[in-house]
Amino acid sequence: MDIINKLYPYPVLWKNNDDYINSSFDCDIDIEKNFDIITIKAKFKLRNKEINNLIEEQKAEYLLHIEAPATLYRLIKSSMQNEFSFDIEDGHLLGEISLCPFIVVREKITDYYNSKFNTDYEGVTFNLDIGNILAIGTQCKFSIEKDTEDLADVPSIFIVYKREDDDKIDMKVEINSDKIRIGLNRDVYENYNHAVALQSSMLDIVNTAIIFPTLVYVFEQLREGLEDYKDYRWFRAIEKLLNKESIYLNTETMDSIISIDLAQKIMHMPIAKTLLTIKNIDANIEDE
């Protein structure tokens, strides 16, 4: 997610506004790559006593939002400590990665007031709900580029975006560019964002619902003419994935193997993985 200027119905500590005086919030982020692991270290820097007190009382917490659009990967890490680190497998990350630091409400707060409010808010209090943003730090971006072999990774060749048209069709696919573009209507895109933000296990379900039918469509288009798409990056990635299965992307293959089978081979039998994920989620709910 990109941090954009927006108006909040309550004061937010942010360098892009003047809601607070003599206060600041930011985060130093250090990124280290060790073999196939990315280590992210975050050090939050807060200068506001009352917000700091909320964190100490566990009514608010530091939060770091990580997003890699190229791989559809999202992760949220939170802590009451102003320093923490965590590891991410680099298979989840490709291209431009954004990291957004926040302080968010952890427990409902009534009649919130801060002595460092701008004078415009003098004498005014606010009721804050869980998840409300108290402070926003500077967004950090970095890029991860991989060797050609690593680019043969299914999520890295797709872009999922929100369509702005009024067409109610759930999904539209465009393949005339280096990445396959999947346009979702507004409602579907909102639900998609919610699903991928919940937990990494949901990705199997999301990929089966969106990526799998897209690949079936792609192979149907390739049957009309392989030569039209050979220069695109997604074509080369799919070609490498099939080669690992001793399948070669040529006219003979397209004539002998149906599209749905090719899509299943590339995604390593996604339906079985999805049903297993659903089964595990259901088992966890029953345990609770």
Image (tube, grey):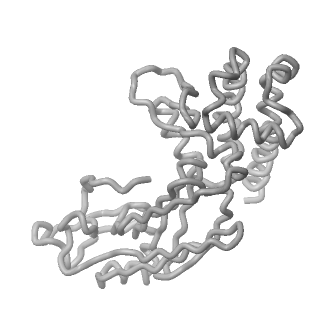
Quadrant position of the C terminus in the picture: bottom right
Q: Residue at x 62, y 41 (%)?
A: 157
Residue 188, percent across and down? 52, 33
* Residue farthest top in this picture: 224
Q: Is residue 117 left or right of residue 58?
A: left
Q: Is residue 122 above or below residue 83?
A: above
Q: Nearer the viewer, residue 139 or 223?
A: 223
Pick whichever, 27 or 48, lies toward us.
27
Q: Position of residue 273 (x, y in %)?
A: 80, 44
Asked which quadrant contains residue 134, the reply is: bottom left
Q: Say if 64 sits above or below 5 in the image.
A: below
Number of disc labels: 0
Residue 195 against residue 271 in the figure, above or below = below
Residue at figure coordinates x 64%, y 56% from the top left: 146
Q: Nearer the viewer, residue 65 or 251?
A: 251
- Residue drawn 78% across the image and 38% down it: 266
Q: Residue at x 84, y 43 (%)?
A: 244
State the image coordinates of residue 283 (x, y, percent, origin top left): 79, 52
Q: Looking at the picture, tell me which residue is in the foreground, 39 or 131.
A: 39
Residue 67 shown left or right of residue 127 in the figure? right
Horizontal side, residue 179 vs residue 278: left or right: left
Q: Position of residue 48 (x, y in %)?
A: 29, 81
